[in-house]
Image (cartoon, rainbow, N blue to C red):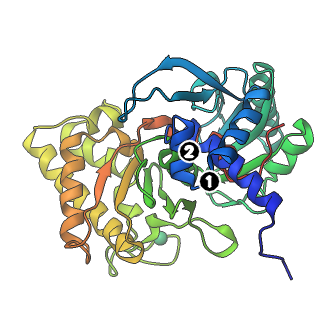
Amino acid sequence: MKNLGKNAADNKKNNRGKVLGLIATGRCRTRRDLVDLMGLTKVTISNIVSDFQEKGILMEDEKLSLDKAGRRPVNIKISPSAPRIVGLLVIRDRVEVVLCDFYLHIEYREKVILEHPTEQELIRIICRLVENAIGKAEKVIGIGVSSLGPVDSGDGIIMEPPYFYGIGRLPIVSILETKFSLPVRIHQDNESGALEEYYYGNGKGHESLMLVGIERGVGCGIIKDGKIYSGFHRLSPEIGHVSIDYKGRKCICGNRGCMELYVNSEELKARFEKTFGKGKSLEEYISMQDIPEMDELMDDIMEKLSAGISSTINLLNLDLVILGYDGAYISEKYLNLLERKINEKIFNSSRMTVVVKKPYYLQDAQLLGAVCNILQPVFDGDINIP
Ligand SMILES: [Zn+2]
């Protein structure tokens, strides 16, 4: 039987990772903050910080600022010499790579638009991009992958995504680990994006949230109590297949009236074209507002989205919804409308108010989420910094 207990060495790794996470995500700035938030002794925190300073991962900031008690605590920050992280996004239309520091600053990025690649061509593109990114850094801790689903994140495999050039069961984690001898972690793209928003974006301060990505389908990633929430075989939740009409159109999943049949990007574009004429991109249509026809269309679209989202919220009681991918183009006016509609529909509305936002990193949320797929195990002490 697996030993579920934690020993002292585990705890030490855990605390070290946590210190890095709290500094990198701006939740703590000083040793005092770390002591207060982590509940450890001053000596323990000082030892961890000194060790990271010696290794060139943390450093003291020269800028001093007065705290509330009139002291001048020394700010701790991530050192420029700390290792970097590679993030890789694999989705239907493109492969994109970034090299980031612990603050999620992008130091290098490169992308390739996919034009019907074979599996071998796709692997070659991926390896070339990752190699280029690694080449820009002195030290890299690992490679995070954010991929279109379904993804088996336990075995590190991109399963059989629909409309993905017939490519499936791609063991991307073992391919990258073998080629680059670095730790590799993968999650579905919206789960990765949700993780990124939780640590660095608009999810700060929330322990649970949902990122809903509107594209050819509608996917989601859910963070519950600070962790990615998944089920059987770590498959991600599928909000697009929550039915909003049991007598509705038949879906490929077997159900009827699934939300994604009505609010996917192609369906939305077709509706805008029918009303306003062809010739604009989805982004241009979606950013239109203060036109009566648009108000009417958006009222219907937000009604449908709120039906599927509120059903999901009633199961999990999440108080933050972030709309990503093409949803990030939706203007504040209609996001507020969606927020109102969701709050009208949830059971716990007297105890909880749901907030709807765009991702802080907008269209880059899922790409930067790839980086967080490595940072989370680092912050949890599961990946050691060399
Ligand atoms: Zn369905």
Pick the front one: 206 or 106 = 206
Residue 46 against residue 39 in the figure, above or below: above
Q: Circle 2 sits on which residue?
A: 34
Question: As rendered, which of 161 and 175 lies closer to the eye?
Answer: 175
Q: In what quadrant of the picture does the N terminus appear?
A: bottom right
Q: Quadrant of residue 109?
A: top right
* Image position of 89 (left or right of 385): left
Amino acid under label 2? Leu
Q: Position of residue 243 (x, y in %)?
A: 38, 74
Name the side, left or right, on which 253 lies relative to 248. right
Query: Mark 1: few, some, or many residues within 10 Å (few <14, many ≥20)?
Result: few
Q: Of marks 1 and 2, which one's residue comes earlier in the chain?
A: 2
Evaluate whether residue 119 shows in this view.
yes
Whether pointer 1 and pointer 2 mark residues with C-beta atoms closer than 8 Å, the reply is: yes
Name the quadrant containing residue 308.
bottom left
Residue 145's label in the rendered image is: none
| Residue 290 in the figure: left or right of residue 369 | left
Do we see residue 110 in this rendering? Answer: no
Of residues 144 and 253, which is closer to you in this image?
144
Q: Compared with residue 189, is residue 234 higher up or lower down, i.e. above or below?
A: below
- In the structure shown, which secondary structural element does the residue marked by tag 2 occupy? helix
Residue shown at 28%/63% (left/top)?
306
- The secondary element bearing badge 1 is classed as loop
Name of the residue lying farthest toward the left: 292
Q: On the image, numbered disc 1 is attached to which residue?
A: 40
What kind of residue is marked 1? Leu
Camera-side residue: 182 or 151? 182
